[in-house]
């Protein structure tokens, strides 16, 4: 099983354009510099390039979006200097792109704009020292608090919309040092706000899409727990003390209690389990020291539980043996270990940081915590301090590779469950980094056999007779079975099926079964594909040298002999010359239908002779009258159509025709009293020519 998974990973990575090797339980230096304090290369804003690289930075704000791209904002570059740029990294092509911000300018002030209103000029400003971050269910990036220009704490909440490339100031003060307003515990209110703080890295999203945040450091250390509901734009103070710096209350290990609390702390690892519980590990309480305890918060009961680790500070831990899960193993006391991940088996991972207090010696150890067995496993890195690391060759995996010890580094996770880490500060020498590393977990060491997860996306609102392509976002799979009800083809085993065509209107399900050597996963999305109704049929009628399509559509484009006619975008077109004409008509669903007319003869005579035709009254209520009506002995037919070109009424011939060779009537009256109100076409056909005249029925 392990060998099959290993072969799959090697094959998968070999197909990526980054062309880097990958071996289980090995680090790979993938991008950036192996020298500290580099300024980076911004390139052109919005343009990805292999030579782009962010500058070295520490404790900015990071996200992984729903498409597997990595993002970060701000961060500190050397002492007292903060960035306000937004970067995106695409792991499939190994390229960075500078997306937003002033392009390397330091210590920029915020541009708040109007609260709740996005704008291209809005900017959170220079920001660092570990703001909280979330990705909501709509793939928007959220950021709260942090330190503004390294001097003052903030409590404002921002949202970044990826599709519009705009920031929105959502809530909180537009100045530093706000005391906030906790309100009443457990009661949401539009006036509630957490106090200004930094090092509030403990952030989660629950099953309802609400944003959670715990602790941090501001005017004092905090042990308050907050929930923010996006739909109501309200904070709720859920637990803890928003004012005092309280020590932990441990209670009994493994037993929840309303009085239990992790106490005031900051700079820790955090995770959410598959049951919606919130977890944290480590951090620092400045009144005493650094922790290596594990805590769980249960939303349903609003209670904390001390799960693992000692109840004392500055503990040296017990490393045990590499890749051996042991109930006695425990990391040493850690803080600023913000690089943390959750794998597909629900295990928690944490990397590096610093340990104990005083000189803050740096760490580069990688640990896995199993919340089911409540045990730690030391997976990689040194048990010592200030390890200088080994970069090896860029893009080449090696068992001797290991990142240098650091604190405040970023963390991301790709769609295949690999762990990514980079940037941060080497605490032993205050060096700042812009390197990027990837770690491939070994199932034999991590105890996680890469359970596959089915996921996909596609343009799913389409016109009849068109095709769509599917993007496979699944994780950990080696084979795929797709079912496309109502489509042609209706079945595929391709990883990313293309040209799946839907000819008939309706709503249709899509099913994907993904499999690896361990197990399979099925995802069925009912009514996922919407095929719009057929657009109304079209036709072209000629009146003199004017061509009329059916009115009432959203857009029109006329063509002459197959070539587009610039500016010809009305429902009618005056033909300046003979030939073949067609019109492409677009409906409200952006679906198109086409009509054509051939062998048009421009400047032809009216079907009713040389007289001047007049319709009155227009608008009409009971009757319409036609004057200037002449007949030269030919058969004439008069009928009425609606704006869609549908036949409505045939005028009885006896009401306007006499059996004489040549005659002239000054006026012909037609009864329209039974027609609903609207716009109609009066059609007069004769001499193989059709004249259409619009009128309005009141």
Image (cartoon, grey):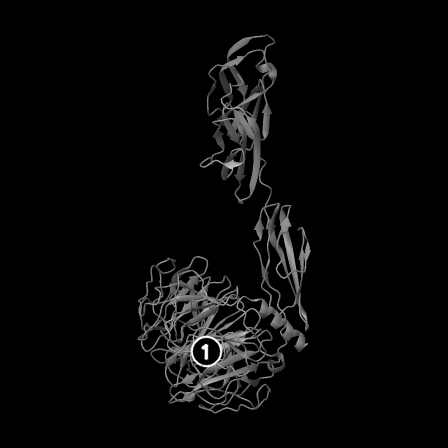
Identified at 63% across, 50% down, the residue is 501
User: Where residue 276 sits in the image (x, y, percent)?
Assistant: 55, 73
Query: Camera-side residue: 85 or 30?
Result: 30
| The one of 472 and 302 positioned closer to us in this rendering | 472
The percent coordinates of residue 64 (x first, y second) are 49, 68
Query: For mark 1, does the 10 Å Cα neighbourhood hold few (<14), some (14 to 19), or many (20 or more) residues?
Result: many
Residue 51, quarter of the rendered image:
bottom left
Is residue 262 visible in the rendered structure shown here? no
Disc 1: which residue: 338
Image quadrant containing the N terminus: bottom right
Q: Do we see residue 409 in this rendering?
A: yes
When asked about the image quadrant of residue 597, the answer is top right
Q: Residue at x 52, y 11 (%)?
A: 665
Determine whether 522 is above or below 503 in the image: below
Q: Is residue 592 left or right of residue 245?
A: right
Left or right side of 656 for 432? left
């Amino acid at each position: 099983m392990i060998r099959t998974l290993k072969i799959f990973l090697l094959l998968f990575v070999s197909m990526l354009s980054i062309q880097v090797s990958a071996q289980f339980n090995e680090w790979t230096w993938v991008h950036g510099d192996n020298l500290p304090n580099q300024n980076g290369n911004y390139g052109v804003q919005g343009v990805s390039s292999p030579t782009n690289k962010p500058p070295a930075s520490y404790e900015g704000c990071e996200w992984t979006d729903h498409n597997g791209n990595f993002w970060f904002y701000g961060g500190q570059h050397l002492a007292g200097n903060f960035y306000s740029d937004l970067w995106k990294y695409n792991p499939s092509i190994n390229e960075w792109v500078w997306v937003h911000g002033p392009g390397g300018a330091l210590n920029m002030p915020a541009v708040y704009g109007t609260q709740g209103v996005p704008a291209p000029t809005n900017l959170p400003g220079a920001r660092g020292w570990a703001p909280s971050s979330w990705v909501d269910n709509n793939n928007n990036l959220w950021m709260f608090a942090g330190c503004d220009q390294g001097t003052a704490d903030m409590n404002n909440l921002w949202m970044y919309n990826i599709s519009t490339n705009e920031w929105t100031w959502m809530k909180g003060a537009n100045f530093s040092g706000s005391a906030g307003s906790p309100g009443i515990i457990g009661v949401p209110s539009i006036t509630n706000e957490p106090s200004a703080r930094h090092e509030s890295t403990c952030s989660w999203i629950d099953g309802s899409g609400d944003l959670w945040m715990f602790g941090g450091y501001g005017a004092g250390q905090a042990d308050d727990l907050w929930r923010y509901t996006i739909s109501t734009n309200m904070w709720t103070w859920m637990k803890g003390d928003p004012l005092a710096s309280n020590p932990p209350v441990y209670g009994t290990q493994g037993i929840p209690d309303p009085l239990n609390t992790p106490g005031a702390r900051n700079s820790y690892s955090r995770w959410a389990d598959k049951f919606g519980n919130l977890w944290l590990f480590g951090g620092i309480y400045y009144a005493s020291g650094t922790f290596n305890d594990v805590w769980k918060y249960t939303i349903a009961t609003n209670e904390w539980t001390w799960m693992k680790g000692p109840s004392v500070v500055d503990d040296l831990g017990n490393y045990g043996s590499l890749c051996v899960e042991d109930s006695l193993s425990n990391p040493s006391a850690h803080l600023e270990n913000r690089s943390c991940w959750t794998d597909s088996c629900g295990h928690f991972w944490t990397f590096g940081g610093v340990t104990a207090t005083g000189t803050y010696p740096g760490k580069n150890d990688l640990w896995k915590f199993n919340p089911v067995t409540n045990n730690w496993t030391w997976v990689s890195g040194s048990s010592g301090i200030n390890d200088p690391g080994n970069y090896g060759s860029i893009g080449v995996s090696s068992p001797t590779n290991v990142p240098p010890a650091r604190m405040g580094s970023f963390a991301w996770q790709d769609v295949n469950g690999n762990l990514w880490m980079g940037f941060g500060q080497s605490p032993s020498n205050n060096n700042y980094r812009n390197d990027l590393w990837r770690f491939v977990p070994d199932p034999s060491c991590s105890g996680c056999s890469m359970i596959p997860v089915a996921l996909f996306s596609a343009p799913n609102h389409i016109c009849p007779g068109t095709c769509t392509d599917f993007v496979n976002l699944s994780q950990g799979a080696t084979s795929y079975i797709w079912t496309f009800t109502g489509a042609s083809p209706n079945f595929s085993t391709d990883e990313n099926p293309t040209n799946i065509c839907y000819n008939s209107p309706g709503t249709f399900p899509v099913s994907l079964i993904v499999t690896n050597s361990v197990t399979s996963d099925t995802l069925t999305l009912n009514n996922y594909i919407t095929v719009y109704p057929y657009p109304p049929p079209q036709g072209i009628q000629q009146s003199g040298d004017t061509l009329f399509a059916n009115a009432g559509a959203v857009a029109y484009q006329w063509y002459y002999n197959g070539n587009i006619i610039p500016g010809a975008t009305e429902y009618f077109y005056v033909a300046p010359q003979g030939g073949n004409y067609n019109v492409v008509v677009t409906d409200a669903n952006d679906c198109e239908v086409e009509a054509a007319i051939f062998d048009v003869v421009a400047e032809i005579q009216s079907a009713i002779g040389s007289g001047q035709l007049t319709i009155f009254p227009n608008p009409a209520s009971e009757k319409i009258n036609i004057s200037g009506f002449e007949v030269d002995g030919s058969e004439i037919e008069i009928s009425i159509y609606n704006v869609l070109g549908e036949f409505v009424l045939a005028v009885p011939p006896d009401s306007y025709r006499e059996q004489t060779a040549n005659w002239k009537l000054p006026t012909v009256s037609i009864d329209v009293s039974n027609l609903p109100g609207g716009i109609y076409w009066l059609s007069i056909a004769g001499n193989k020519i059709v004249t259409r005249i619009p009128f309005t029925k009141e």
